[in-house]
């Protein structure tokens, strides 16, 4: 099972490498993360110009490493795509919290009935 996950991660990483290298000379945009440093805030607001192949590889590595650490970092072609992604993540997080709340309610009811 782990081997399949590794193969999937490698394929995803390679696809993202291609995505980043296709954007050399273009500005890309990232979603908001838990990091509030000056650089991250500026890149969030203004985007990031991919300078060359080495830079594209570095940014890809940053995205991949950040996600391995359990964060959700993703770069996009447009601010609109980024904003849509962020709304989707909020909706998913909201649904997860609702499901947890419902589970607690049912667990409490089960305890009362036993």
Image (cartoon, helix red, strand yellow):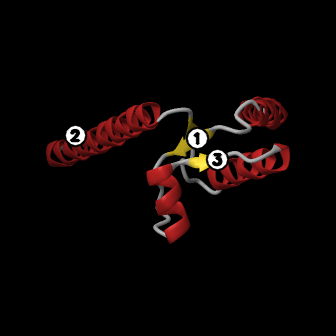
Q: Is residue 15 left or right of residue 113?
A: right
Q: Quickly name the residue at label 3.
A: 49
Identify the residue shown where x is 37% and y is 36%.
92
Q: Residue furthest bottom?
A: 37
Nearer to us of marks 2 and 1 is 1
Nearer to us of marks 1 and 3 is 3
Tell which of 88 and 77 is nearer to you. Answer: 77
Q: Is residue 32 above or below residue 10?
A: below
Residue 6, by quadrant, is top right
Q: Position of residue 108 (x, y in %)?
A: 20, 48
Identify the residue shown where x is 53% and y is 43%.
29
Q: Secondary structure at mark 2?
A: helix
Residue 77, by quadrant, is top right
Q: Position of residue 7 (x, y in %)?
A: 83, 31
Q: Are the two marked residues, 1 and 3, in contact with CB atoms closer than 8 angstroms?
A: no
Q: Quickly name the residue at label 2.
A: 106
Name which of mark 3 and mark 2 comes first in the sequence: 3
Distance from disc 2 to disc 1, alpha carbons, whole Å, reads 45 Å
Q: Is residue 8 left or right of residue 47?
A: right
């Amino acid at each position: 099972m782990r081997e399949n996950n590794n193969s999937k991660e490698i394929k995803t990483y390679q696809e993202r490498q291609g995505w980043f290298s296709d954007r050399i000379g273009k500005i890309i945009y990232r979603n908001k993360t838990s990091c509030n440093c000056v650089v991250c805030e500026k890149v969030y607001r203004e985007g990031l110009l991919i300078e060359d192949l080495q830079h594209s590889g570095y940014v890809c590595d940053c995205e991949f490493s950040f996600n391995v650490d359990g964060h959700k970092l993703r770069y996009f072609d447009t601010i609109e795509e980024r904003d849509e992604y962020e709304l989707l993540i909020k909706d998913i997080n909201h649904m997860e919290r609702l499901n947890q709340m419902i589970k607690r309610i049912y667990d409490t009811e089960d305890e009362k009935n036993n």
